[in-house]
Amino acid sequence: MYPTPSKCPACGEGLVVARLSCPACDTAVEGRFQFSRLEALGPEQRAFVELFVRCEGKLNWVAQELKLSYPTVRSRLDDAIRAMGYEVRDLPPAEEKARAAEQRQVILDDLAAGKITSAAAIKQLQGL
Protein backbone atom coordinates (compact mmCIF):
# COMPACT_ATOMS: atom_id res chain seq x y z
CA MET A 1 0.00 0.00 0.00
CA TYR A 2 1.14 3.52 -0.74
CA PRO A 3 0.55 6.63 1.38
CA THR A 4 -2.49 8.57 0.26
CA PRO A 5 -1.54 11.62 -1.81
CA SER A 6 -3.44 14.75 -0.85
CA LYS A 7 -2.22 17.05 -3.66
CA CYS A 8 -2.67 16.66 -7.41
CA PRO A 9 0.67 15.78 -9.03
CA ALA A 10 -0.25 17.83 -12.12
CA CYS A 11 -1.52 21.13 -10.69
CA GLY A 12 -0.90 20.94 -6.92
CA GLU A 13 -4.56 21.41 -5.93
CA GLY A 14 -6.05 19.32 -3.13
CA LEU A 15 -7.45 15.93 -4.10
CA VAL A 16 -10.86 14.54 -3.12
CA VAL A 17 -11.43 10.88 -2.28
CA ALA A 18 -13.99 9.53 -4.74
CA ARG A 19 -14.09 5.79 -4.03
CA LEU A 20 -13.56 3.58 -0.98
CA SER A 21 -13.45 -0.19 -1.19
CA CYS A 22 -13.29 -3.10 1.23
CA PRO A 23 -10.46 -5.55 0.42
CA ALA A 24 -12.28 -8.37 2.24
CA CYS A 25 -15.65 -8.36 0.45
CA ASP A 26 -15.13 -5.97 -2.49
CA THR A 27 -17.89 -3.62 -1.34
CA ALA A 28 -17.29 -0.16 -2.80
CA VAL A 29 -18.64 3.23 -1.80
CA GLU A 30 -18.43 6.11 -4.24
CA GLY A 31 -18.93 9.81 -3.57
CA ARG A 32 -16.91 12.86 -2.56
CA PHE A 33 -15.14 12.34 0.74
CA GLN A 34 -12.94 14.84 2.53
CA PHE A 35 -9.43 14.12 3.75
CA SER A 36 -8.72 14.67 7.43
CA ARG A 37 -6.41 17.53 8.32
CA LEU A 38 -3.71 14.94 9.05
CA GLU A 39 -3.75 13.94 5.38
CA ALA A 40 -2.58 17.47 4.52
CA LEU A 41 0.77 16.66 6.12
CA GLY A 42 3.72 15.57 4.04
CA PRO A 43 5.48 12.28 4.86
CA GLU A 44 8.10 13.91 7.13
CA GLN A 45 5.45 15.92 8.97
CA ARG A 46 3.31 12.79 9.45
CA ALA A 47 6.30 10.95 10.91
CA PHE A 48 6.95 13.90 13.23
CA VAL A 49 3.32 13.97 14.43
CA GLU A 50 3.39 10.20 15.04
CA LEU A 51 6.56 10.60 17.12
CA PHE A 52 4.98 13.55 18.97
CA VAL A 53 1.98 11.37 19.90
CA ARG A 54 4.24 8.44 20.85
CA CYS A 55 6.16 10.84 23.13
CA GLU A 56 2.86 11.83 24.79
CA GLY A 57 3.12 15.41 23.50
CA LYS A 58 6.38 16.07 25.32
CA LEU A 59 8.55 18.14 23.00
CA ASN A 60 11.60 17.50 25.18
CA TRP A 61 11.20 13.77 24.60
CA VAL A 62 10.83 14.37 20.86
CA ALA A 63 13.99 16.50 20.91
CA GLN A 64 15.90 13.70 22.65
CA GLU A 65 14.56 11.08 20.25
CA LEU A 66 15.52 13.13 17.17
CA LYS A 67 18.72 14.48 18.77
CA LEU A 68 17.62 18.02 17.91
CA SER A 69 17.36 21.18 19.96
CA TYR A 70 14.05 22.10 21.54
CA PRO A 71 13.62 25.22 19.32
CA THR A 72 14.11 23.09 16.18
CA VAL A 73 11.52 20.58 17.37
CA ARG A 74 9.13 23.40 18.28
CA SER A 75 9.58 24.84 14.77
CA ARG A 76 8.72 21.46 13.23
CA LEU A 77 5.59 21.27 15.35
CA ASP A 78 4.62 24.79 14.27
CA ASP A 79 5.11 23.76 10.62
CA ALA A 80 2.82 20.74 11.10
CA ILE A 81 0.19 22.89 12.83
CA ARG A 82 0.23 25.35 9.90
CA ALA A 83 0.13 22.53 7.32
CA MET A 84 -3.04 21.26 8.99
CA GLY A 85 -4.63 24.67 8.46
CA TYR A 86 -4.40 25.98 12.02
CA GLU A 87 -2.74 29.13 13.30
CA VAL A 88 0.24 28.92 15.63
CA ARG A 89 -0.50 31.01 18.70
CA ASP A 90 2.09 32.93 20.62
CA LEU A 91 2.44 31.93 24.25
CA PRO A 92 1.80 34.53 26.92
CA PRO A 93 5.12 35.78 28.38
CA ALA A 94 4.58 33.94 31.69
CA GLU A 95 4.02 30.61 29.91
CA GLU A 96 7.04 31.22 27.67
CA LYS A 97 9.23 31.78 30.76
CA ALA A 98 7.82 28.65 32.42
CA ARG A 99 8.47 26.60 29.29
CA ALA A 100 12.06 27.88 29.07
CA ALA A 101 12.65 27.06 32.74
CA GLU A 102 11.25 23.54 32.19
CA GLN A 103 13.50 23.07 29.15
CA ARG A 104 16.57 24.19 31.10
CA GLN A 105 15.74 21.78 33.92
CA VAL A 106 15.34 18.85 31.52
CA ILE A 107 18.73 19.63 29.98
CA LEU A 108 20.38 19.89 33.40
CA ASP A 109 18.71 16.65 34.53
CA ASP A 110 19.99 14.89 31.40
CA LEU A 111 23.47 16.24 32.07
CA ALA A 112 23.35 15.06 35.70
CA ALA A 113 22.14 11.60 34.61
CA GLY A 114 24.96 11.33 32.08
CA LYS A 115 22.57 11.19 29.12
CA ILE A 116 24.31 14.12 27.43
CA THR A 117 27.77 15.63 27.58
CA SER A 118 28.52 19.05 29.03
CA ALA A 119 29.22 20.31 25.49
CA ALA A 120 25.80 19.08 24.33
CA ALA A 121 24.16 20.68 27.38
CA ILE A 122 25.84 24.01 26.67
CA LYS A 123 24.75 23.86 23.03
CA GLN A 124 21.15 23.05 24.01
CA LEU A 125 21.06 25.76 26.67
CA GLN A 126 22.36 28.33 24.19
CA GLY A 127 19.57 27.31 21.81
CA LEU A 128 16.88 28.27 24.33
Image (cartoon, rainbow, N blue to C red):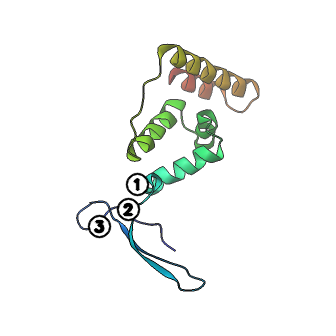
Residue 11: give x, y in percent of width and height: 23, 64
The quarter of the displayed image where residue 61 is located: top right
Q: Say which element carries label 3.
A: loop
> Mark 2 sits on what residue?
6
Mark 1 and mark 3 lie on one chain; the one further toward the N terminus is: 3
Q: Say which element carries label 2.
A: loop
Query: Callout 3: 10 Å neighbours few (<14), some, many (20+)?
Result: few
The outermost residue toward the right is: 113
- Amino acid marked by disc 3: Pro
Marks 2 and 1, how far apart in space? 6 Å
Marks 1 and 3, how far apart in space? 14 Å
Residues at discs 2 and 3 in contact (Cβ within 8 Å): no
Residues at discs 2 and 1 in contact (Cβ within 8 Å): yes
Residue 126: give x, y in percent of width and height: 52, 21
Classify residue 67 as left or right of residue 9: right
Marks 2 and 3, how far apart in space? 9 Å
Q: Indicate whether 53 appears above or below 24.
A: above
- Amino acid marked by disc 1: Ala
Q: Indicate whether 32 appears above or below 45.
A: below
> Mark 3 sits on what residue?
9
Mark 2 and mark 1 lie on one chain; the one further toward the N terminus is: 2
Q: Indicate whether 40 appears above or below 85.
A: below
- Amino acid marked by disc 2: Ser
Numbered mark located on residue 40 in the image: 1
| Residue under the point 76% across and 28% down | 113
The quarter of the displayed image where residue 62 is located: top right
Q: Indicate whether 14 appears above or below 104.
A: below
Query: Callout 2: 10 Å neighbours few (<14), some, many (20+)?
Result: some
Q: Say which element carries label 1.
A: helix
